[in-house]
Image: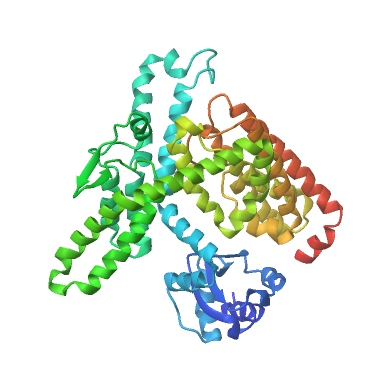
Amino acid sequence: MNYKEIAQDLLVNLGGKENIVAATHCATRLRLVLQDETKINQIEIENNASVKGTFSTGGQYQIILGSGVVDEVYKEFVQLANIESMSTQDVKNLGTKKLNPIQQFVKVLSDIFIPIIPAIVACGLMMGINNVLTAEDLFISGNSLIGAYPQMAGLASMINTFSNAAYVFLPVLIGFSAAQKFGGNAYLGAVLGMLMVHPDLLTAFSYPQAVAENSVPYWNVFGLHIAQVGYQNTVLPILVATYILAKIEKLCHKVIPTVLDNLLTPLFTLFITAFLTFTIVGPITRTAGDMLTNGLVWLYDSTGFIGGGIIGLFYAPLVITGMHHSFIAVETQLLADIAKTGGTFIFPIASMSNVAQGAACLAMIFITKNSKTKSLATASSISAYLGITEPAMFGVNLKLRYPFYAAMIGSAVGSAYVTFFKVKAVALGATGLPGIIAITPGYMTYFIIGIIMTTILTFVLTYIFSIRGAKLTINQSE
């Protein structure tokens, strides 16, 4: 390969070196921050044989070149653009500054939750396994697996205990991750999370009953009554508390003499933050979190399948902006209060959206005559059905537009269907086909029908849209 020629071609079609703010690369992608992304000649870039795909996210324009190739192209690119090499984090920070306040907020939320998703997914899948073992009528009419095979009861009980860990101690995970994101000491963030789920406190699960019985325990601090209530399974309280912790820690570093910094900064930071958490932050955010969750549940319950369809229609556009990551907090809260909510209704809707994106790509395999697009559509379709839709959206559907519109409609109909039958998930995990295991027992059939319905409708609509006016788009893009 002539790496200099590839770099030169990319630089020209990116609007020239005056349009390049910063550049770095990861294992497979050239990651750029540009002055104006409207100056990009998208068609010419994608026609470059070395380019495997492109997408824009988090204020960065990323070009997929592949392992090995990207290193050599990057060396030539920074020389031609006359810019300095930068770290991935520095470019990421520059890209974040280009985002609007809402996008920045969502990105912060995403950066906090994404590192702990493996823990939540692992426990969520164990919940799904326990669900399979204990669900009646799933495999045996009128009985469950542990009912038919009592020797499996101990295993089911063990799995159930394991599956609760990430949710019961969720503030610890969030505290550690959030403190890192906000620039504080991650271990102080974890300890703050531990304080909020300390066994000496009344658990969050027992709090509503204690309120009803007027038996909530209190600390009496100089006449100030502070509720001794934990924050198990909560999200918003630890997020706000950790932000305050990071700010107090930075202030302490500035005002406390260096010789006493290591001794007094952790002490003051943790004590002040913990005091504020139990007196102000906790009660307010607990109420706010309950209002947010109750509002979504009310919307879901009040508008029925119409509301579900609307959420399904706009779910994929939210994925493009990254706003779908904010749903993690809501879903976690819904699962934390599963006895009241019955589970999360967002998970089945997200699954319908992912399946729709996969079905649109599946249709493109048969519609397109371009071998590169066909190959990409095949891999992207499989990925979307397994819960990862970015390749399908950024690589195929958005580029051609009409498959994306078809997927939005298919998602809306499928989401309306599963909402109509009150399909919910009892755990978080991979959406799409793997999401079946997380669905409430007795509703899996409706979930499967929703997947089939979404697939067929999206596939057909993609074909119809391609016949009724999309041929010009196909030829131009390919």
Q: Quadrant of the N terminus?
A: bottom right
Q: Is residue 419 left or right of residue 125?
A: right
From this viewpoint, is residue 431 visible? no
Task: Relative to 302, say whether 173 is above or below.
Answer: below
* Nearer the observer, 360 or 74: 360
From this viewpoint, is residue 417 visible? yes
* Residue found at the very far left of the displayed protein: 259
Task: Relative to 391, say whether 147 is above or below.
Answer: above
Q: Quadrant of the C terminus?
A: bottom right
- Residue 167 occupies which quadrant of the picture? top left
* Nearer the observer, 448 or 287: 287
Q: Colour scheme used in the picture?
A: rainbow
Q: Is residue 463 left or right of residue 34?
A: right
* Nearer the observer, 84 or 426: 426
Task: Relative to 146, say whether 235 is above or below.
Answer: below
Q: Is residue 327 left or right of residue 283?
A: right
